[in-house]
Image (tube, rainbow, N blue to C red):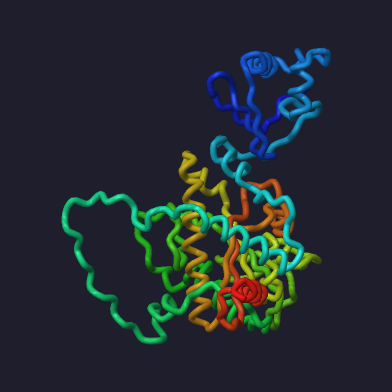
Amino acid sequence: MHINPYLFILPRTPGFIVWNYKDHLQHELDLDYSCRLAKLINNPNLFNQDNIIDTQLLNAGIITASKIDSPEWGWDELSKIYHIGTQNIPCEQPPQNIQEWSRQYLSHCNEVLAKPAPATERPAQDTQPRIALPASRVLTDDSLGHALRERKTCRSYTGEAITLNDVATLLYLSFGYLHERDNDRDDSIANGLDARRSSPSGGGLNACEGFVLAQNVSGLQPGVYAYHPAEHALSLINPLPESALGLLLGGQHFINNLPLGLFITARFDKLWWKYEHSRAYRMAFVEAGHLSQSFQLVATALGFGTWLTGAFSDDQVETLLSITGSAEQPLFFVGCGASDGQAMCQEMQDLLQQAQT
């Protein structure tokens, strides 16, 4: 017999809470069960099929008849628990089309709105009068200010193709290593860590990477590509999945005709190399956020609508990107394309209009 490697045990009087963080299952053990489990952890060979506690622990998956392999993660167990424990959004019945997604999402929003909202501002901590800042400068239409004002999340796309030149611009200015900054370095920068993107990166590690999902790019075969920032080049990883893109992204089928998407992944082995503390895991999400915003601003400046989501099936995405079981994991998805600028898909607008009649 073997102990399930995906267990997290919390002491909670009068016993233990045993959490299977991979399967999202929680068990409460009293003193008898806790003591027996402790003995089996010390020596799994003590398992006795005539002992009712042993058989119940087996049926619950706390003990397993065969050994379960867990991915090699390095020294940092806490981040492994957090990462695996937060994978795969629970969904009893994934939406099979855009109408189902719209109904489920609208129902969810109504449930949220029915609860008391948190305070708009955090509790006041200042004791001195606040300082009013001057109004922001009005920048020209070809400026960063214009892109910041125009950027919005769109859920309605025409499906029009994106040119390869635009894809190259998007990737270089958001994920590429900027040649313009080759001379922007000094003796404080370690060898091998001198590459610079337009977004900041914890420790200059550039731990996040980009995988392009090209559905309709002129001059580029549809497929999933890895972007190589040092070379500013693409390499084909896999063909597009046969199923609709919406099934991969939490049932959000309004995005099925999005011409260009980008999965942002994190190389955790890079983070653990420099930062031997689980707080480094947070930095992966911070960096992904920086890169996501840079991508959206560049896309907006090019005249595209943008969309982003963290709702996807980790297992399916890992397979699609060919990174299953590795220390590189998907964190976020962004995309862009020609759009009519609508924040809501037509199906959601129809539902809202029906509710008002």
Q: Residue at x 65, y 72 (%)?
A: 351
> Residue farthest to the left?
128
Q: Residue at x 77, y 25 (%)?
A: 58
Q: Is residue 259 left or right of residue 76?
A: right
The tally of labels here is: 0
Q: For the N terminus, which image quadrant?
A: top right
Q: For the C terminus, which image quadrant?
A: bottom right
Task: Say above or below: 131 vs 128.
Answer: below
Q: Is residue 155 left or right of residue 218?
A: left
Q: Position of residue 117 (x, y in %)?
A: 44, 55
Residue placed most toward the observer, 54 or 273: 54
Task: Say above or below: 219 vs 281.
Answer: below
Q: Residue at x 65, y 64 (%)?
A: 226
Residue 182 in view, yes or no: yes
Q: Is residue 238 left or right of residue 89?
A: right
Residue 102 figure quarter: bottom right
Residue placed most toward the observer, 81 or 129: 129
Q: Position of residue 311 (x, y in %)?
A: 62, 58
> Residue farthest to the bottom?
141
